[in-house]
Amino acid sequence: MWDDAFPSFLIGLREGLEAGLVVSILVATLVRSDQKGRLPQVWTGVLAAIALALSFGAVLTFTAANLSGTAQEAFGGTLSLIAVAFVTGMVFWMRRSARTLSSEIREKVTAALTMGTGVLVVTSFLAVGREGLETSLFLWTTARSAGEATGPAIGAAIGLVLAAGLCWGLYRRVLKINLTRFFTYTGIVLIVIAAGVLSYGLRDLQEGGVLPGAHAYAFDLSGSLDAGSWYATLVQGVFNLTVTMTWLQVAGYVLYLAIVMTLFVRGLKGAAATAPKAAESATSPADERPGGSRNRWLVPAALVAVPAVLATAVIAASNGKPAAAATVTVSDAKEECGKGFSTPQPGQQTFQMHNTGSKTSEVYLVNPATNAVYGEIEGLAPGTTRPLTATIGSGDLAWRCVPTGGDAVTSAAVHVTGGPAVKAVLPVAEDDLKAPLDQYKSYVNTGLAELLTLTQHLQVDVHGGDLTTAKASWLTAHLKYSSLGAAYGTFADLDKKINGRADGLPDGVNDKDFTGFHRVEYGLWHGQSAADLTPAVDQLVADVADLGQKFPGQDFDATDLPLRTHEILENTLQFELTGDTDAGSGSNLATAQANVAGTQELLTVLQPLIEARSPELLGTVNAGMKRLGDLLAAAHRADGSWTPVQQLDPKARTQLNGATGQLLEDLAPIPDLLEIRKSA
């Protein structure tokens, strides 16, 4: 954790000091001009800037969390590159501006004082807001590369608190700091750190499919270095350098460091040459000697060289990796798969898996009799090595190597005694999901036939001008459709026609492409006539009939079933429990109940697979389903109507959202639990 804190500490200290200097000069100018009554204007701008920075960080986190795995890599990589650009620009700007920062700010404050309240608020907001946004972006990027937020958050907090203390000391004139040197030296360190962030961002873009060369490794030291050791963790946390790096990562790191550091150091000489006399008097004799310019390279060179020398010494002294980390061969040849594996001791073990074959492979540590999986690596490229950590208990163990496009091979088994019972993952084969898929497709086919009948009843009501009955018929038909949520992915464009919303359409609810249930709902609850609704309901019936004919021939991926157990209720929480999809009927909670019913159907067909792997999880999920169902049922009124989401008692709404959120947490392990693994 603490190794991940240093980069955030440094950025928090620098950005905090920059923003704090601005605020302290603003305050000092107001106090000295006898205008203390205007201090609240400064603090208003400062608080607004802090709120903006926190909101920006929340938006980044929320956006990334709602993307697919590949999209998250691309998103994170892009933001890493933006963060590097911001940090680089900040370093160069502060190198140029450190000497004149105070006078420039005082000029702006003096101008603001003559222009009213709003300008002073905006001045403080803009001065602090820029630093806040840069801090949020860099902190988010650092937390993502670290894989956890605690260390970076603590580091940034310490840096900001220290910056606030330094600014207070400067304001009270009890402290003197050579700001030019401070920003110069921290700028040099930040350039080295930014090079690592750039390297990490490029790797993210490679893994996201945006850049090529994801498997073109410049070096792979995982066979000789322990990636989990303290020194490897420290280097990765501070510099973002890992034991395995691609050619693009190395090229980006070296080129950035060489170009940016050179420009920065050369700029120091130019800045010194144009500095005022007061600044010149502070220079050391070494700077005035003919060889002084060479001395400017001493700090950056030492910063790069010293850690490298120390790391080499530590690695040499520790033999690179612990003796327990045995190297095991991965190959599509039976005699090579698992080579180097001997009977391990019970407990947690790390194995260095080295692919000697010609194909990218998956490798699993399994019980060969039951196929239970104790550890796995996916996508191990030829010639590369990656660590696999597993907890070893009593029983038989073997390695199963599964090359891409080839047959699985299993090594000879070893028998471990004296260890505890260890929980393993029972793999799921594609054939295991065939029966649940067939059951669910039968459920959907039956549901679509019923849906057609129900929409035809709605059509008859509208054609007959009985719009009161049509409202009840609409709700019944829409709830039937909402209970088929797991199949939406196979409905293709027909889902948009049948259940699409007006959001995003050029003419909104009046757009010609606004069709389906929500179009009819809007008309029924907004006083449109039967004649106005007839084309919409006729189109709905035609689209439902078309779906019923096409669905049996659609490709329904069996791996979608475990994913949908979670995704249906994600949509419920996002759209139904917020009321976003309400077009007038106020029936969001009825739709939510139909979504729960659809999720329950999925759990029913998947129950044998879940129960065999995690019976306690199934019990937890069933309890959560009942709790959510009871809360939704409480919103169903005695006259058959439903309480609109917006009219729920605040406590009831909080309980409903909380129960849904908890159920989503309980359902989250199911996709991984039922992931198809080739180890079986």
Image: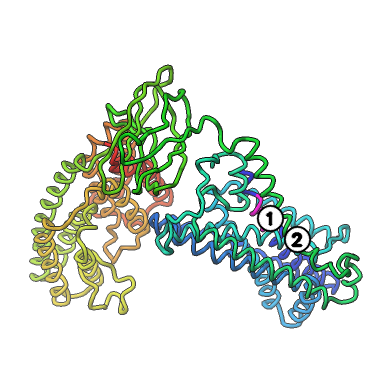
Residue 13 visible, this angle: yes
Q: Is residue 105 left or right of residue 394?
A: right
Expressed as whole percent of the image width and height from the top left, the position of residue 190 reads: 67, 60
Task: Pick the residue in front: 6 or 259.
Answer: 259
* The image quarter in which residue 129 lies: bottom right
> Which residue does the numbered mark 2 point to in the structure image?
185
Expressed as whole percent of the image width and height from the top left, the position of residue 483 reads: 21, 52
Total numbered labels placed on residues in the image: 2
Task: Pick the residue in front: 161 or 318.
Answer: 318
Task: Pick the residue in front: 469 or 197.
Answer: 197
- From this view, report whether residue 13 is shown above or below residue 638: below
Q: Looking at the figure, which quarter contains the N terminus?
A: top right
What separation in Å lies between label 1 and label 2 (alpha carbons)?
13 Å
- From this view, report whether residue 554 is shown above or below residue 605: below
Expressed as whole percent of the image width and height from the top left, the position of residue 77 reads: 49, 61
Residue 44 visible, this angle: no
Within 10 Å of disc 1 (Cα), the crowding (few <14, some 14-19, many 20+) is few
> Which residue does the numbered mark 1 point to in the structure image?
304
Expressed as whole percent of the image width and height from the top left, the position of residue 500 reads: 25, 66
Q: Is residue 544 left or right of residue 81?
A: left
Judged from the image, the secondary structure of the residue bearing numbered disc 2 is helix
Please report whichever mark, 1 or 2, sits nearer to the chain's N-terminal start: 2
What is the number of the mark on residue 497? none
Viewer-side label of 1, 2: 1
Task: Pick the residue in front: 359 or 133.
Answer: 359
Q: Looking at the figure, which quarter contains the C terminus?
A: top left
Residues shaded magenta: 6-12
Name the amino acid, label 1. Val
Within 10 Å of disc 2 (Cα), the crowding (few <14, some 14-19, many 20+) is some
365 drawn magenta: no
User: Residue at (54%, 65%) from the top-left corner?
Assistant: 81
